[in-house]
Image (cartoon, rainbow, N blue to C red):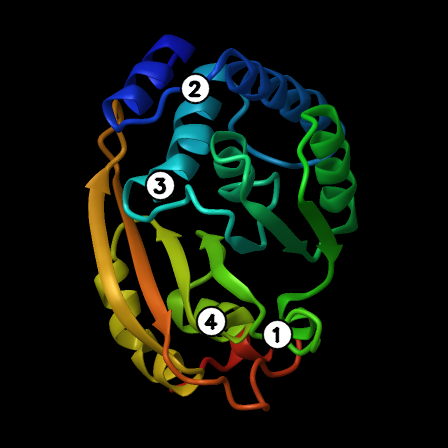
Amino acid sequence: MDKHTFLNALKEKGIELTDKQQEQFRHYFEILVEWNEKMNLTAITDEEGVYLKHFYDSITAAFYHDFSEPITICDVGAGAGFPSLPLKIVFPELKVTIVDSLKKRITFLNHLAHELELDDVAFYHDRAESFGKNVKFRENYDLVMARAVARMSVLSELCLPLVKKGGLFLAMKGPNLSEELEDAKPAIQTVGGDVKQVYTFELPEENSERNIAIIEKRRKTPKKYPRKAGVPNKSPIV
């Protein structure tokens, strides 16, 4: 997806980028490629690939949820900043927190945010399990996001404890989500969530399946969750 196609595809969805926003995406791509030479941030480094599979793919969340309000977002395991930082560029009023377990990635994200002049962004080097236990962050966010980080049974335990009651957990996934969601039902229920909506669509050009699951936080998460680092992955709630 070249830049022109990227802009037109967003325009078709009612999103028109200013010159400043276009420049921020251009600079984002440059910094990503530059830093990727010294640390592993992404396997996708060609411009058309980054614009389609990272930038556009991240923004698809806005086709199914309203990001125009100044809501608080926590992005769990964002890696090189996806999906929350492309959304932050498009919707500058968002208040974004990213938690990632790799210190190098947090260093990259701090540099990136400075270079792109992004306000109201915070980055934390931590495991999602311990971050979710921290009273400063627990049940504190309007929306928690994760993009292809782990299977839904694991993600639910990591992300829903951070969502305030009445807030949402938005999971961005590839194909076969229905199977994952079926397995994740006990975990979602246990930590206080209910599946609200699932959207299935295709990424343009390559026509690969994408799914977005929106889960509402209906009940407070029991204190024992999330469990210790590594446990949710090894022994998902059943």
Mark carried by residue 6: none
Whole-percent x, y for residue 200 in the image? 20, 48
Q: Name the residue tied to disc 1.
A: 138
C-alpha gap between disc 4 and disc 3 = 24 Å
Q: Which of pointers 1 and 4 lies earlier in the amino acid sequence?
A: 1
Q: Which of pointers 2 and 3 lies earlier in the amino acid sequence?
A: 2
Label 2 residue SS: loop
Q: Quadrant of the N terminus?
A: top left
Q: Which of pointers 3 and 1 lies earlier in the amino acid sequence?
A: 3
Q: Quadrant of the C terminus?
A: bottom left
**Disc 2 residue crowd, few under 14, some 14–19, many 20+, Cα 10 Å:** some
C-alpha gap between disc 3 and disc 1 = 24 Å
Q: Tell me which residue sits at (30%, 52%) in the image.
A: 212
Q: Nearer the viewer, mark 1 or mark 4?
A: 1
Q: Amino acid at mark 1?
A: Arg
Whole-percent x, y for residue 140 in the image? 58, 69
Q: Amino acid at mark 2?
A: Leu
Q: Name the residue tied to disc 3.
A: 62
Q: Is residue 207 above or below residue 164?
A: above
C-alpha gap between disc 2 and disc 3 = 14 Å
Q: Are marks 4 and 2 in contact (CB under 8 Å)?
A: no
Q: Quadrant of residue 192?
A: bottom left
C-alpha gap between disc 1 and disc 4 = 17 Å
Label 3 residue SS: helix
Q: Amino acid at mark 4?
A: Val
Q: Tell me which residue sits at (34%, 75%) in the image.
A: 184
Q: Which of pointers 4 and 2 lies earlier in the amino acid sequence?
A: 2
Whole-percent x, y for residue 85 in the image? 56, 38
Q: Name the residue tied to disc 4.
A: 154
Which residue is nearer to you in this view: 184 or 139? 139
